[in-house]
Amino acid sequence: MAVKIRLTRMGTKKKPFYRIVVADSEASRDGRFIEIVGNYDPLKDPAEINLKKERIEDWLSKGAKPTVTVSSLLKKKGFMTKEV
């Protein structure tokens, strides 16, 4: 099972916010996930990013790969992650 750290869309039409989740790479975008590790609200000024740092570090050490978008969000918050 390949594990990814990625975004799932929440909210209503034209008012999205996103959960940052750990999920199997074959699961659908808004489908089953393993754990919620943060959230991202792009509509706030500046955009709000909340992360569970210990859990993200744990999943990265176990081999979870962040998507390109999540990788850029992690870099904004000070995580030094490898490029995908």
Image (cartoon, rainbow, N blue to C red):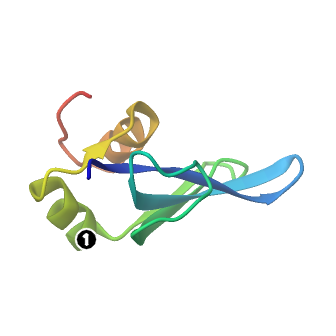
Residue extending farthest left: 61
Q: Residue at x 39, y 69 (%)?
A: 34
Q: Decide: is 72 above or below 57.
A: above
Q: Decide: is 78 above or below 19.
A: above
In which quadrant will I find the C terminus? top left
Q: Where residue 82 sits: x, y (%)?
A: 17, 33
Q: Decide: is 76 above or below 3.
A: above
Q: Where residue 17 sits: x, y (%)?
A: 68, 56
- Crowd rating for badge 1 (residues with CA inside 10 Å; few <14, some 14–19, many 20+): some
Q: Where residue 75 sits: x, y (%)?
A: 31, 40
Relative to residue 71, is residue 16 drawn left or right?
right
Residue indicated by mark 1: 55
Relative to residue 81, is residue 6 drawn left or right?
right
Q: Secondary structure at mark 1?
A: helix
Relative to residue 41, is residue 49 drawn left or right?
left
Relative to residue 47, is residue 69 drawn left or right?
left
Q: Residue at x 18, y 61 (%)?
A: 57
Q: Residue at x 36, y 51 (%)?
A: 5
Label count reads 1
Q: Quadrant of residue 65?
A: top left
Q: In the image shown, does 46 or 74 lie closer to the viewer?
A: 74
Residue extending farthest top: 83
| Amino acid at the residue labelled 1 | Arg
Q: Residue at x 45, y 35 (%)?
A: 69
Q: In the image shown, does 47 or 84 lie closer to the viewer?
A: 84
